[in-house]
Image: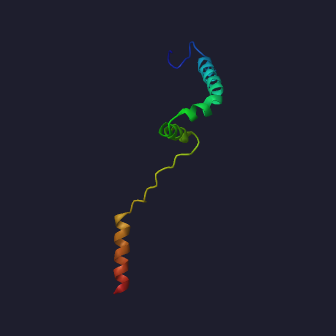
């Protein structure tokens, strides 16, 4: 590529055919095998079945963001404490 000029390859905005083909093949494979899933699950040990279900959970349940306490500004805390003592005098 010479100085920002496109000289070959796919045109801008054209999809990658290989990626689309691979996605389609995987989709077809999963669609065929999903029918056998109940039989496969019934053959698993309880621990294996639980591990399998746990691995699938992120695909159906949203992940929760960690909740953080707001950081306290020491200056505001000092002002608050100071104002409490002033009120008592």
Residue in the image at 65% along x and 29% along y: 35
Residue in the image at 47% along x and 39% along y: 47
Image-quadrant location for residue 81 = bottom left
Of 82 and 51, which appears nearest the observer? 51
Residue in the image at 34% along x and 81% along y: 85
Residue 24, how many percent across, how many down? 64, 22
Q: Is residue 1 above or below residue 39?
A: above
Q: Is residue 33 left or right of residue 55?
A: right
Q: Is residue 32 left or right of residue 5?
A: right
Location of the C terminus (image quadrant): bottom left
Look at the image and name its color scheme.
Answer: rainbow
Q: Is residue 19 above or below residue 55?
A: above
Q: Is residue 66 above or below residue 44?
A: below
Residue 32, how many percent across, how many down? 65, 25
Extreme-bottom residue of the structure: 89
Q: Is residue 54 left or right of residue 35?
A: left
Image-quadrant location for residue 29 = top right
Of 21 and 75, which appears nearest the observer? 21
Residue 44, how many percent across, how many down? 52, 34
Image-quadrant location for residue 71 = bottom left
Residue 36, how many percent across, how many down? 63, 29
């Amino acid at each position: 590529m010479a100085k920002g000029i496109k000289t070959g390859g796919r045109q801008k905005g054209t999809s990658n055919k290989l990626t689309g083909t691979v996605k389609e093949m995987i989709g077809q494979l999963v669609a065929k095998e999903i029918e056998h899933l109940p039989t496969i699950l019934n053959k698993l040990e309880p621990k294996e079945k639980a591990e399998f279900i746990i691995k699938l959970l992120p695909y159906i349940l949203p992940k929760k963001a960690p909740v953080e306490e707001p950081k306290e500004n020491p200056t505001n805390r000092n002002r608050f404490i100071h104002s409490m003592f002033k009120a008592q005098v």
